[in-house]
Every structure is written in structure tokens, then in C-alpha cells.
Amino acid sequence: MPSHPDFQKLGRRTLEIERDAVATLIDRVDESFARACGLMLACTGRVVVTGMGKSGHIGGKIAATLASTGTPAFFVHPGEASHGDLGMVTRHDVVIAISNSGETPEVLTILPLFKRMAAPLIAMTGKPASTLARAAEVHLDVSVAQEACPLNLAPTASTTATLAMGDALAVALLEARGFTSEDFALSHPGGALGRRLLLKIRDVMRSGEALPRVAPGTPLTKALLEMTRKGLGMTAIVDAQDHVVGIYTDGDLRRTLDHGIDVRSASIDEVMTRGGRTVAADHLAVEAVQLMEQHKISALLVKDADGRLEGVIHINDLLRAGVV
């Protein structure tokens, strides 16, 4: 029977070849790279990325990375471009055309149309003397010494190098634009980062009838019933104007019992924690998480500027919202 190949050795060899391919790009981040960034930064339209086959897949990812980091971009399939999709491109756009050979027929077919509308062309190829490279205003050399494929045929190291060069462009533009984590969150509202940077306490807090609250002087037994009804393991103590006086939690109940206090005769005033930890409704939900972790508590009272109770935020609310 034939012996099994050394999969670990083959995997390491692949990664070493691709690592070396990316390393060679460092010296190619030169004046051409700076000119490409300048064209995209000055673009008043969008960056249009095109490429065929594996280059197209890489182009789609480059377009997505640009778009999510502050540079409006989209991918156009060169075959579809010849059948109407070219109408999405305007003279205000910048085009990035990707082809390892620089001779991909579908890409070359639409080059004259880009030229006619005077859209600046950036080429990413592995052949600096190719037709695509020579037609472009800027050429970025993403050639590799060899593919990781032992037949030197399947695009592997070359696609990795192209993807890395695309990332370099996107990050350089990100920094040039002063793009912040808040900007990133705005384009990723459904992601974890978006939730952490956009979600406010008022978006997830309990309010209205869901709020557990009792007045000063309330018998402790009635306060415990309020805690049970509202299911948050705590209740706020507020005066007649809804100003926060204190808080009583499950933890306080355990301390009450430890101290031998008669639950049936005690008043909430005798056992509550005065004041309590509070936050403002317009603070980020992630700030509530930090406060809870810092003080080892599971709920916070939400007060308005005048000290009135506005809501309660519980760790379970933050978990359901995906902030934690």
C-alpha cells in the first residue's frame, strides 16, 4: 500500500511559499503604490474593482475591505460588464483591474471603455510588461517566484500576494482618511464591534412598568415582592419625585439574613444601599459592562440629569443585546 503523504510538511511548505511571496511585496510599496493611493483618495466617485476567476474572488474581497474602511468601492465582474454592468462605472470612479497574467481577455475587452470615460486605471498583475500593466496609469507588481501548488499552476501564492497588496492599499487609505473605530462601527452595525460602539444604554435598559421600584419606608416584605414580580433580583428606592434614594438587591438580602435582621418587620430604609451605582441613558452600553465588571454587580440604575430614575440595565439585557 502507498504510504500517506506528510500532510504537516506539505502544509508548512505551502505557508512558507506564501509567506515569502508576501515578504517580497514590501520593497514594491513604492512610488507607484503612493500614486495608486493618491488616485483613490482623490476619487469623488467609487473604486471599481474587476477581475476574472480567482483574481475576481480576490477583487471582491479587496472591494469589500475598501468599502468597510472608508473608501466606497464595489466589484464588477468583467464578463457581466461587457453585457450592461459597465453602466455602473462613471468618469468619477477609479478602476482597479486584477489579472495575474495581465492578458485576461475579459478584462482587456473592457479596457477601452474605461479609457473612453477617462476613469483612472490601476492594474495589479504579475507581469509588468503585460497589456494590462502597460495600459494602466499605475501598475502594482504582485508577481511571485512560484505558486504554492507543486504544479505551479493553481493560483495560490499569487492570490495571497494580491490580497495582501489590496489590504495594504485599504489600510493606507484608512489612516489617510483618519478613519476611526466609530466610523468602522457605522458600516458594521450588525457586528459585535458595531453593537459595542453604537448601542446606548437607553436602547437596552428596562423602563416604565418593567422598572422595579418602591418608596422609602416600604416594608421589606413588600420590596421583596416587587423584586419577585419584576424578576431582576433588585429594586430601586425612589422618593415621590422619582429621585433615586437607594437600591436593594439579592446580595443585600443575603447580608440582611446574615445580620439576623427580621425580614418581616424591617423597613427598606434600614437595609438598602444608599445611592447605588448609576449611569446615564446616553452612555454606551459597553460602559455599563465595564462598571458591572469593576464593581462586581449585575445591575445599574439609570438616572437622568436631575437624579430621577429613568431605567435599570441588567447584565442579562447586555447579554441578549450581544454587548458582552
Image (tube, grey):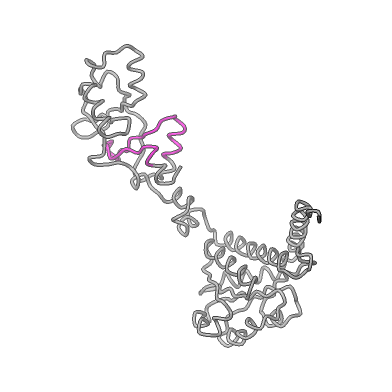
The residue located at (58%, 59%) in the rendering is 175
Q: From the viewer's perspective, is residue 59 above or below residue 81?
A: above
| Residue 8 percent location from the top left of the image | 76, 51
Q: Quadrant of residue 61?
A: bottom right
Q: Position of residue 77 (x, y in %)?
A: 56, 77
Query: Is 226 covered by the magenta stretch?
Result: no
Which portion, as a residue range, is magenta?
A: 288-317
* Farthest residue, direction left: 240
Q: Residue at x 53, y 85 (%)?
A: 83
Residue at 36% across, 44% down: 201
- Count of numbered tags: 0
Q: Is residue 96 left or right of residue 215?
A: right
Q: Above or below — where is 74 with respect to 174?
A: below
Q: Is residue 216 above or below residue 171?
A: above
Q: Is residue 92 left or right of residue 236?
A: right
Q: Which of the 4 quarters of the picture holds residue 96?
A: bottom right
Residue 293 locus on image (x, y percent): 46, 33
Farthest residue toward the front?
1
